Each structure stands twice: as C-alpha cells, then as structure tokens.
Amino acid sequence: MNFDENEPQAVREQRFAAERAERRAARKAASLDLRAAHLGAVIVTVTLILLGWYGKPIALGIVSGVFLLWFAAALAWAHADGDQGRHALQRAYNITFGWGDGF
C-alpha cells in the first residue's frame, strides 16, 4: 500500500479499498497447499494420543481445547473475510495447523 502524501484522503481510501479487494480476490482464487497443515494435524493428533495413553486428562483437555478454540476463531475469521463453505474450512484448517512445515 503505497501512498502519495499530497493525494486527498478520499482518493487514498478508495485506492486502499481497491487494493484490499484485489488481494482478497487473489486469496480466494488461489489453491491452498494443505501439506503443512496435514503434518501439523498429525503432530497434534499423535500428541493427543500420547497424552491420553499416559493418563494425562487435564493436559489432554487443555491441548485439545486450545486447538478447538484456535480452529473456531480461524473459521470465524475466514467467514468474516467473506469465505463460504469448503474454502472457509480449508483456510481455517490451514491457519490452525499450517505451522507443521516448521518441523
């Protein structure tokens, strides 16, 4: 978002709105790469299984609750951004578990 200091505020706001709309359209049209999210989901699943296996119900509840809230917030954000249906679920899944490629 570049701006000229001498341009009127109304012109600047209109240009910024057009740039945001272009980025939103590009984001919605782009295919999501979910490999990293799948890896993150596997890591979380294995962690939850191990917590349950070793009898740590409080830690199991905390970890699963954190990821559930994280996914719900990501889904609400994707929906508020204008995504609907499957694409909103994929974006929320990618936001929640997309950190998996960092391992």
Image (cartoon, rainbow, N blue to C red):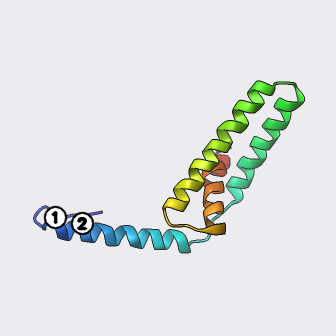
Q: Nearer the viewer, residue 9 or 46?
A: 9
Q: From the viewer's perspective, is residue 82 above or below residue 65?
A: below
Q: Is residue 101 visible?
A: no
Q: From the viewer's perspective, is residue 21 above or below residue 80?
A: below
- Residue found at x 37% / y 67%: 20
Mark 1: which secondary structure?
Answer: helix
Q: From the viewer's perspective, is residue 18 above or below residue 55?
A: below
User: Are there few (<14), some (14-19), or many (20+) residues within 10 Å of tag 1?
Assistant: few
Q: Nearer the viewer, residue 2 or 45?
A: 45
Q: What distance separates the C-alpha of mark 2 from that of mark 1?
A: 6 Å
Residue 41 appears at what percent x and percent y? 74, 48
Q: Which residue is mark 2?
A: 13
Q: Nearer the viewer, residue 85 or 41?
A: 85
Q: Residue furthest left?
A: 6
Using the image, tell me which numbered label, if any, was put on residue 9. Answer: 1
* Residue type at tag 2: Glu
- Residue found at x 70% / y 31%: 62
Residue 93 appears at what percent x and percent y? 66, 55
User: Are there few (<14), some (14-19), or many (20+) residues within 10 Å of tag 2?
Assistant: few
